[in-house]
Amino acid sequence: MEYLAVVDEKDKVIGKKSRKYVHDHHLIHRGVHVFVVDNSGRILIQKRSKSKKDRAGYLDASVGGQVLSCETYRVAAIREAKEELGVDIKNIKEVCKYKSFSKRQREIRTLFTACHDGPFSINCKEIEWVKFFTLKKISEMIMNKNLVFTDGFRLSFKYYLRKVGEN
């Protein structure tokens, strides 16, 4: 059974509960997104597997997941990249941390980037496919009502664009 750290709104650990308990009781916990970026600056997008319990078939961040109670954000991001894409990401950089609160879950998320051009060995239980897209193309895709992105991706992308614009 996987345990997540339960945190307060300032990201201070206040307990530890099972993943199911945390989600069933809408408790604040920690999560990560990683935008894998290639040498051209394109972001790797994943299409979530149709067998996923939540948001099946949606487009999402290159890597995403929850931070286990024994992990740091960075360690969780590296673990999730290995589990989902089959790659070791060593050059991971923190972009920002923010609150991702919705009716579905309450997560304090850290967004990372990592450079990697592939190849990838995707976990087919979690991911249907991955593909690189330019920032412009992703923005266009978000506007297309026929393509469905997770709310979490939309939020991470918004923060990413803010940070990219600062550079």
Image: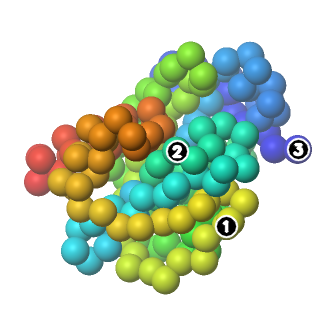
In the rendered image, which quarter contains the C terminus?
bottom left
Residue 1, which numbered label?
A: 3
> How far is disc 2 from disc 3 in space, using C-alphas?
26 Å
Q: Amino acid at mark 1?
A: Asn
Q: Nearer the viewer, mark 2 or mark 1?
A: 2
Residue farthest to the right, as pictured: 1
For the residue pair 34 and 118, the one nearer the viewer reads as: 118
Q: Is residue 163 above or below residue 80?
A: above
Q: Which residue is mark 1?
A: 123
Nearest to viewer (mark 2 / mark 3): 2
Dot placed on the residue nearer the N-terminal end, 2 or 1: 2
Query: Quick one: label 2, few (<14), some, or many (20+) residues within 10 Å?
Result: many
Task: Answer above or below: position of 3 versus 64.
Answer: above
Q: For the point 22% across and 74% down, which residue is it?
A: 40
> Which quadrant would the N terminus be assigned to in this image?
top right
- Figure coloring: rainbow
